[in-house]
Image (cartoon, rainbow, N blue to C red):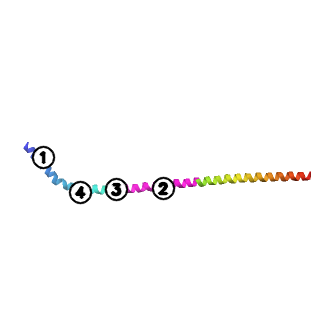
Amino acid sequence: MLLWVFFLVTLTLSSGSHGSLPSQPLRIPRYADAIFTNSYRKVLGQLSARKLLQDIMNRQQGERNQEQGAKVRLGRQVDGVWTDQQQMALESILVSLLQERRNSQG
């Protein structure tokens, strides 16, 4: 039993002294990976924010275009109504002038 305890203590001490040497080179790639991962996440976050901002701007531009289109359509409708009213007014004036002329001749 004492031999097993000695063996475990020796193994633990030897792995502690030698284990620190290989772990140091392993830390450098891990550190580099962490730096890359953090930088990559930042870039992805910036790209995502930029895309979101462009989507919002495109939506606003689309709404403005729709509003302008609605104004143009409304303007055309108003123009059409105005033209119809003018035409009806001119027709009524012409009809009244023709009736006056017929009355004055007849």
Most common secondary structure along the magenta stretch? helix
Between the C-alphas of marks 2 and 3, the distance is 24 Å
Query: Marks 1 and 3, Cα distance to the nearest angstrom?
Result: 40 Å
| Circle 1: element type | helix
- Check whether the beta carbons of the residues at disc 2 and disc 1 lie within 8 A of each other: no
Q: Which residue is mark 4?
A: 25
Q: Report x, y in % for residue 13.
A: 13, 51
Viewer-closest of 13 and 86? 86
Task: Identify the residue shown where x is 13% and y is 49%.
Answer: 11
Select label 3 or label 4 by which is in front.
3
SS state under label 3: helix
Depth check, front residue: 87 or 41: 87
Disc 4: CA contacts within 10 A as few (<14), some (14-19) or many (>=20): few
Q: Is residue 57 magenta?
A: yes
Q: Mark 2 or 3 closer to N-term?
A: 3
* Residue 80 is one of the magenta-drawn residues: no
Decide if residue 69 is on the left or right side of residue 30: right
Few, some or many C-alpha atoms within 10 Å of disc 1 (few <14, some 14-19, many ≥20)? few
Q: Which residues are magenta?
A: 41-66
The three-letter amino acid code for the residue at tag 3 is Asn
Where does label 3 land, which residue? Answer: 38
Numbered disc 2: secondary structure = helix
Q: Position of residue 2 (x, y in %)?
A: 7, 44
